[in-house]
Amino acid sequence: MKRLSRPTALKIAAVLSFLLGLYGIVSALPYLARGAADLSQAGDAPPYLVILLGFALSIVRIVAAFGNWQNQRWGIVLTLLANALVALTSMPGILYAPTTYLRVSATITTLLAIVIIALCFWREQRDGLT
């Protein structure tokens, strides 16, 4: 049975991080366009600070995904940090998001961030050890 190698795990983590970063940018743009004043009056959106933080971390994730794809240490570290922060900031949305779409999005984002972190820590098993 063929096992997952470390370079392959890092490439999968880079692709997932890039796609999740792209999704974060695209999903944050409509909220950013509405502005902080409109979002504070509407009850169907997360706080503006969360939107800004998510947008900034999405940009960082895309940059980190490039370094991770190249198997650079800075890319792996940045991917770990960015995904840890994304997981921490999206966890409250699992319970307290105002809409079902945002709850599902927060849940999927948190789970994928944890998977990306696990892939970055992936190590190959040595022969003879089970």
Image (tube, grey):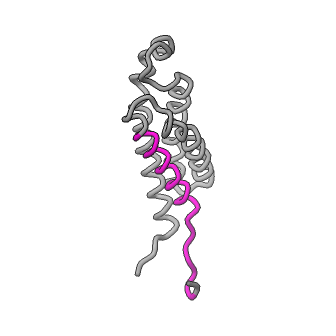
Give the image location of residue 128, x and y in percent: 57, 88
Compared to residue 87, the image places residue 130 above or below, namely below
Please tell me which residue lies in front, 71 or 126: 126
- Residue at image point 55% right, 44% down: 87
Viewed as shown, does residue 125 lie left or right of 3? right
Could you tell me which quadrant the N terminus lies in? bottom left
Give the image location of residue 62, x and y in percent: 48, 41
| Residue 111 magenta-highlighted | yes
Toward the front, the furthest residue is 95
Toward the left, the furthest residue is 101
- Residue at image point 43% right, 50% down: 16
Compared to residue 43, the image places residue 130 above or below, namely below
Please tell me which residue lies in front, 125 or 73: 125
Give the image location of residue 5, x and y in percent: 49, 70
Compared to residue 48, the image places residue 54 above or below, namely below
Viewed as shown, does residue 125 lie left or right of 30? right
Q: Main secondary structure of the magenta part?
A: helix
Could you tell me which quadrant the C terminus lies in? bottom right
Q: How many marks?
A: 0
- Residue at image point 42% right, 15% down: 34
- Please provide the residue range marked out in magenta: 104-128
| Residue 80 magenta-highlighted | no
Compared to residue 69, the image places residue 102 above or below, namely above
- Residue at image point 37% right, 35% down: 101
